[in-house]
Image (cartoon, grey):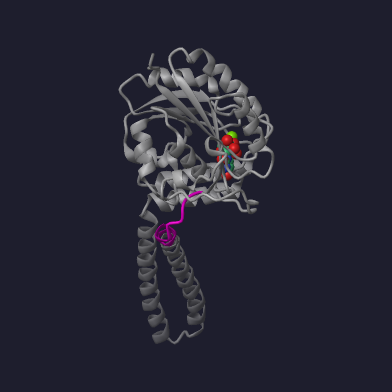
Amino acid sequence: MADHRPLVSVVCPAYREQEVLPHFHAELSRVLGPLEVNYQFEILYIDDGSRDQTLEAMKAVAAADGRVRVLSLARNFGKEAALQAGLEHADGELIITMDTDLQHPPELIPQLLEKAKEPVDLVITVRQEYQKPGWFNQIGTQAFYRVMESLSEVEIRRETSDFLLMKRNVADVLMGMQEKHRLMKGLIHWMGFAYLEVPFHVKERTLGQTKFSFLRLMALGKDCLFSFSKKPLTLATTAGLITLLVGLVWAVAALVQIILGNSNWIAHYMIVSSHVLAGAILLAIGILGEYVGRIWEQVRSRPNYLLKYDSHQANHRLAAHQPPHIKVFDTAAPKDQERA
Ligand code: UDP
Ligand code: MG
């Protein structure tokens, strides 16, 4: 008899999570077990080019559990790329994305599935008062969202996380967007699909460490800002206008001083104005550069990730089966490169 249980894909990116992965899988399996009456599951683990034993841990889990599919990226392409890889290989009618460090509690999955029965496209989780450990990271996160809130053209809520359930239609739209600097959270809000919320408490990480250092958070913030907003370009124009006006006032003032014969004053004026102008111009060029760089990356249109391993096709080369934008090559030593 045909199996009418809907297929649910659980997509889990992992980067250097060798310690926590087996625990995560045990926990996930415990939660999924009772749900198998109504659903079928596939679990996609995406190794984001880890240089520790994460891939081996995934393969061990896959050997013992037929629901598991393992993908491995050729190097560390960043969490967003790993998520994209997972979505592009997920077959489920419903897709759940979550971290593998147990900070996103698997116990929430039954609630997500229950809410997905409503006529909505997404069920998102909303974090309750969680602070990243370390004041530097906290400042980084706060700065990130402050800037986003004031400048972004889409609402990216501080409390939303990448722990969410999307229906097939959402995943299809997401995959149609071949943006280089992706931010799934942002794209999902930009798309404007109907969603329900589930509140949850982020747990402290007990094993492994966060991969989002202050610098990586800043890089992510820049991606988020310049990929979702044109406002910084307008800021440069506004700043340029103000500088110009101030310059004009100073010019008149300087003229008056010259007429009054006070030449010493002009030297100060020259120094101040040249610094202000140089700063404003460099800032404006820098902002332009951020956009030009993004246009360049988009035009160059390299794939967002390269796959080096897929457990479903482990015995033969993968290239023929991939969508055209995914290039695949045989296992090679991953480069020591990291990108958020
Ligand atoms: N991650 C990833 N690639 C990266 C960085 C992180 O796939 O380059 C994964 C990581 O293994 C984890 C999730 O993304 O499953 C969230 O990362 P992390 O826990 O370090 O971030 P935090 O929870 O501190 O924001
Ligand atoms: Mg985490």
> Percent x, y for residue 164?
45, 29
The correct choice, above or below, for 29 with respect to 325 in the image is: above
Residue in view at x 45 percent, y 48 percent: 224
The correct choice, above or below, for 309 with respect to 165 in the image is: below
Residue 299 belongs to magenta span: yes
Nearer the observer, 289 or 14:
14
- How many dots with numbers? 0
Residue 311 belongs to magenta span: no
- Describe residue 3's horizontal placement relative to residue 127 as left or right: left
Quarter of the image where the N terminus is located: top left
Give the extent of the magenta segment: 294-305
> Percent x, y for residue 324?
41, 50
Nearer the observer, 335 or 65:
65
> Percent x, y for residue 147?
45, 47
- Describe residue 143's horizontal placement relative to residue 233 as left or right: right
> Percent x, y for residue 197?
40, 25
- Res 139 visible: no
Residue in view at x 58 percent, y 31 percent: 100
Nearer the observer, 16 or 162:
16
* Quarter of the rendered image showing ligand 2: top right
Residue in view at x 33 percent, y 39 percent: 191
Nearer the observer, 218 or 54:
54
